Amino acid sequence: MFVVMRIAATEAEVLGVKSRILAEGLTPYEHAGNSGLQLAVVGELGGRRAALMEVLAGLPGVERVTPINRPFKLTSREFHPEDTVIRVLDAAIGDGSLTVMAGPCSVESRAQLLLTATRVKAAGATILRGGAFKPRTSPYAFQGLGVEALRYLGEARDETGLPVITEVMEPNQVDIVAEYADILQIGTRNMQNYSLLQAVGRVARPVMLKRGYGATIEEWLMAAEYIVSSGNPNVILCERGIRTFETYTRNTLDLAAVPVLHNLTHLPVIVDPSHATGKRWLVRPLALGGVAVGADGVMVEVHPDPDSALSDAEQQLTIEDFEGLMDDLVAVHENVRGLHDAAQPVAIELGAADGGLSKH
Ligand code: PEP
Ligand code: MN
């Protein structure tokens, strides 16, 4: 549930409501939105829900108490109707502009990263990506350059002005990665690594949470809820394909997730057609498709010589391919942005028809 405070509520009244929530062993989270101050009441309510709603509604300064009909609370549009906009260096994600994250799958050398960084920046990318710690299916495959790669990413940021994003795989890597990176990435394999989610929830860096390849939208939002409830409101969601019976593509890109997420949550949504398809020639149409369905941006892998790449050689774009794609992404974005703004919001019903979002 969330408590909507009266516009004229005093600080003492707000404190009174918070203390009452804390006294119940629950946690109040504030959101000062367009319609005033709201307090989400988060925790295990059990059978107390109805009685507590009545108690809180009767406290001084309270306008009304509204249930949140979703298992995810802080990430829900019900609690936080306005879009979350994440600002990092000169980039803004979720403000209606087009975010383009580009760079190699893995940072392989200083020269490879700096060359890619300068060229993708010149082409219009807004964020530089590059893996330092790589989650590889095979223990014998290239595992990334680790801290050496983080240093190159820091250098590339200083040289280009682009914020950098890189993956963090374990709670004990969070501090060192946060020292160099502007955005922390949680990979598909770690979407439900709850101690890692809590660890990135405690640092002052935005987090991009990739969808688990076997995760439902609800499980994904619950994972985001771990990060936000640990204290970090700056979460970006990244649809990177899910595993289905189809084997031609590496994964199946769930483009429907984009408008569904925009309906259910205020967090920005990015589409990654590189890991979704695993095939270079499919990156372009699906990147354009991602922007067309209203994603806040895309993440694509770009390498100066993809065929010699140490990881994901088959899906990385050449720099020239990326330059061509960039122009077309901008064109699609220009054409669709007004259309999505004008779309009527749909109230997604809970139950089977909406893909089984459960009621809590
Ligand atoms: C990546 O973006 O580097 C990556 C490993 O992606 P995913 O976690 O989606 O497989
Ligand atoms: Mn990759």
Image: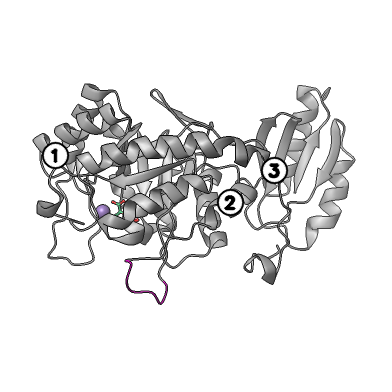
The tag earlier along the polypeptide, 3 or 1, is 3
Q: Is residue 42 magenta?
A: no
Q: Mark 2 points at which residue?
A: 259
Q: Which residue is drawn at 71% across and 38% down?
A: 39
Q: What residue type is disc 3 on?
A: Phe
Where residue 269 appears, x then y in whole percent?
49, 45
How far apart are labels 2 and 1 at the CA level? 39 Å
Of residues 44 and 196, which is closer to you in this image? 196
* For residue 236, above or below residue 256: above
Tell me if I can see residue 178 in this picture: yes
Q: Name the residue under label 1.
A: 148
Q: Which colour scheme is used?
A: one colour
Q: Residue 79 carries which label?
A: 3
How far apart are labels 3 and 1 at the CA level? 42 Å
In the image: residue 141, left or right of residue 53: left
Q: Which residue is drawn at 12% across and 46% down?
A: 305
Magenta range: 244-249
Q: Are marks 3 and 1 in contact (CB under 8 Å)?
A: no
Q: What residue type is disc 2 on?
A: Pro
Which of the two discs, 2 and 3, sits closer to the camera? Answer: 2
